[in-house]
Amino acid sequence: MLNEVTTITSGNKEISLVGTAHVSKESIELVRKTIDKENPDIIAVELDEQRYEALLNKKKWDETEIHKVIRTGRAYLFLTQLLLTNFQRRIGDKLGVSPGSEMIEAINIAREKGIDISLVDRDIKITLKRALNTMTLKEKLKLLYALLEGILEREEIDDEILEKLKKKESAGGGI
């Protein structure tokens, strides 16, 4: 379940896992409270280097050179990532929370308190490539259709819908 803290002990180390949703005000508050309470030695954020930079430097996304992406044969990965990012941004706009705000909060607190940050996710390009490689053409077309429908859909997304998604553990990510 999201928006909860699970503690794991390994040897003499204690690890607090904070379940979050990327577009939840409650997740931002939970991150803040957990870091204050636990006073960790290190904060692990579920990001790879590329998404970390994109999250903290919004202009970098705008500076992406499309022709280089196409020349390297990664256009489909770029398109998939773009569609997913836009879909999350649309949900965030409706709820008044930028996607990844809980991670930005954790990073900002870590910087303020001098706590080390560890990026603990695999490169998103590898994840997307593996996922797309296991899908049939029909599944890829369904995914593309669902993403486009999600971007164009006019159904209102509110806190109640987000809470239902959290209970189903449909949203991912965390710190």
Image (cartoon, rainbow, N blue to C red):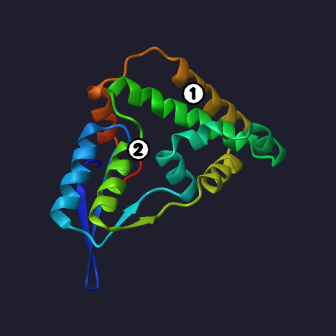
> Residue furthest toward the right?
71
Labelled pair 2, 1 in contact (Cβ < 8 Å): no
Lower sequence index among marks 2 and 1 = 2
Extreme bottom residue here? 11
State how far apart marks 2 and 1 are (Cα): 22 Å
Callout 1: 10 Å neighbours few (<14), some, many (20+)?
Answer: few
Q: Which amino acid does the dot numbered 1 rest on? A: Ala
In this view of the protein, can residue 100 be seen by the observer? yes
> Looking at the image, is 80 positioned above or below residue 5?
above
- The answer to whether 4 is drawn above or below residue 12 in the figure is above
Q: Is residue 171 left or right of residue 73?
A: left
Residue 52 is situated, as x and y percent measured from the top left of the image, at 50, 53
In which image quadrant can residue 70 be found?
top right
**What's the residue at 37%, 49% (across, down)?**
104
Left or right: residue 15 versus residue 125 is left
Determine the residue positioned at 37% across, 50% down: 103
Observer-nearest residue: 72 or 174? Answer: 72
Work out whether 60 lies above or below 153: below
Relative to 114, 88 lies left or right: right
Residue 136 visible somewhere in the drawing: no
Residue at numbered disc 1: 146
Query: Of the residues shown, which amino acid type is indicated by label 2?
Result: Gly
Q: Looking at the rendering, in which quadrant would you find the C terminus?
A: bottom left
For the residue pair 36 and 82, the one nearer the viewer reads as 36
Name the spot of residue 37 as percent of width and height, x first: 15, 62
User: Based on the displayed image, in which of its 4 quarters is residue 166 positioned?
Assistant: top left
Residue annotated with mark 2: 100
Residue 54 x, y percent position in the rendering? 54, 46
Residue 57 image point, x, y percent: 51, 45
Q: Say which element carries label 2.
A: loop
